[in-house]
Image: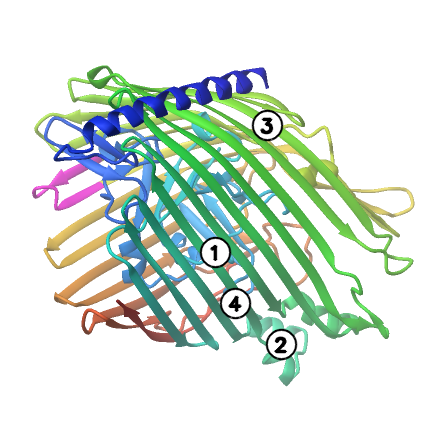
Amino acid sequence: MMLFRNLLIASTTLMTMGAVVARADDSVKQHAPQKQSANQYVIENKKSKAVVSLGDTGLPELISVSAARRPTSTDDIGTSMTIITEKQIQIQQRRSLTDILARQPGLNVVQTGGPGGTSSIFMRGNNSNEVKVRLDGMDINDGSSTNGMFDAGQFVTDGMGRIEILRGPQSGLYGADAMAGVIDITTAQGQGRFKPFVRIEGGGYGTFNQTFGARGSKGRFHYNVEFSHYRMDGFNNIPSYIERYYGANRQQRHEGNRNDNRGVNIRLGYDVTHNFDLGLTARLIQSNNHSYSLYDLQSENLYGDKGVREQNNQNEAIVRGTAHLVSFHGLFDQVLGLGYMTNRNRWTETGTSYGSPVNPDPDYYRSSRLKVDWHGTFNFKQYGQLLIGAEHFHDTFNTSHTASSMWDSGYDTSASMDTTAGYGQYQGNWNHILYGAANIRYDANSRYGNHVTWRVAPAIHVPGTGTIIKASAGSGFHGPSLYQLFANQVGVGYSEKGNPNLKAEQLIGYDAGVEQKLLHDRLNFGATWYDNRVRNLIQSSLSIDSSYDYNYSYANVAKARMYGVEAFLNWKALSNLEFNLSYTWTHARDETNDVQLQRRPQHKFNFNTTWTPIRDLTFSGNILYTSGWRDLPVIGSESCSTCAKRHGYFTIDVAANYKINRYVSVYARADNLLNRQFEDPIGYLQPGRAGYGGFMLNY
């Protein structure tokens, strides 16, 4: 805590001193022929000097702003990564974050209940709660969930200007929950004239979506504000063989899920001086998800319940403000940030059991996170860059349910924790051949102790060949959630209690690969081998006492190993024709009992092509193949988490965009063109063939 306070005081002093210098610099340079905005950075190599803007939709794909917490050429660091631009999202017409992530190498996205349902993101075979997700610098893993994972189910892509996926342990820079990797999302920044727009879309499964907003800049002020409403109604996610097993009637076979999502996405910025700018971002989500699952069907036809339906209402707000200062003619660049996130989830189950309500009082899950952070970069030019930073988090959690019967005693649990961290990184190169970065971080948590993590990521450019050899090694950790530490639910015949003695999960990971560029960089391909070893894995535990009461808890009882290969090929065959291919092979096993880990397919293949035959017409096609995987059986015994196995599947998606004129664009797409019926996870059918279309009005 003392370290954080000292760094915060020092940063505030530097910001104040630098602001004075910035104002002086601004008054001297206000008539200069060329200006570099405070939110712009210079990327230099031996061939060129490029100026890029953070959050600008025109940011080159080959520049990463997350791998080293500063703009860095993707060729100059050993981190294995994928960068998704706003243009790619728009061309492929991916409206939800789950849709765009499911097609990326190294990731497997599992979603229950169709669009809007709970989603889990597995990276390189690691658990979903071991992937850290950030939005505009704010950590947004859901503290109200039982395991602290990020749920992308209600996140739409509107307003997203850039998504960076960093694979491999990243705790050396990003701390807890980044042991598998980081997904860093940046909101698009407005620039240029005032550009309002309206987009209307409709299609299969009762889809009706509306989005409107405006972006642009005026003088020193820039803005991007978008409002959205997404609706889906009528998707039945129960597979036919389960309906037959439980004897579903006609009404049950046609019972559909409904999702209603309303959101606001805002990014504002103001350049106070030439070297000093302020920023504010906010994303607000309000969603209602009504579902009818196989477990509801089971309750009705196996246990005699009536009218069982589930409803989850979610309210989420993510807000972050920043002050960014470039001092001493670019030698020192620093950012001071303040962020807040809150989640309010209300889950209820309608219906009756023997004439009484199944769940008369809802279950509530609430969380909040306050984050204060600062980081600064010393630019020593040819001698490299030194990054230092500090962060402090305050997390709170509450879950409650009112007792409704002698079998239901109710509960009300509240807890909180604080994390203070400091980190440093050096980044440089030798003769434009050997590039790399090395970092170290110290985290002090009030609940599960202190942890030191590290990472090194070198890259070797073989002169004159277009060959780049990359590697990285690092450590990571994932702390137990507040629910896993302090849950306290006691009823007749059962209990679920947290374990305050849980330790953090820990990982050591390595990877190495080769990338090759040919045909004047129009052809780029490569492959990476990775190997991760995890210990102290947190798993649920069950004990049955002498009274035959079932007592659930959590314990550090497992270790695992995940290794595999990620390969890619990007080919710009013509100026208007591009092919992108990726392949992932994953081997993930629980080494405690030598079984395959749940929901980790061994093979994944994705092919995407983009073709622009004429100037204003663009076609996009995508083929996704995923092999079979082990999962929890939904018919029969549910005590074995990997006893069931599903076959693999592949889908074909196509999309077309046509710009009629400056003001009107039309588009259409078809998902799962061959109408493949598949489950992911087992027991939850995914959407079949469906068509969508709409138009956009621009000014």
Camera-nearest label, 3 or 4: 3
Density class for disc 3 (Cα within 10 Å; few <14, some 14-19, many ≥20) is: many
- Kindly report the distance in space between the C-alpha atoms of the residues bearing marks 4 and 1: 20 Å
Q: At which x and y percent is residue 100?
A: 38, 55
Residue under numbered circle 3: 419
Q: At which x and y percent is residue 560?
A: 54, 34
Please report the bounds of the magenta region as a residue range.
515-525
User: Tag 4's secondary structure?
Assistant: loop
Residue under numbered circle 1: 155
Residue under numbered circle 2: 244
Magenta stretch: helix, strand or loop mostly: strand
Residue under numbered circle 4: 685
**Whether residue 159 is situated above or below residue 594 in the rendered picture:** below
- Kindly report the distance in space between the C-alpha atoms of the residues bearing marks 1 and 3: 26 Å
| Amino acid at circle 4 | Leu
Q: Is residue 96 visible?
A: yes
Camera-nearest label, 4 or 2: 4
Marks 3 & 2, CB-CB < 8 Å contact: no
Most foreground residue, 524 or 696:
696
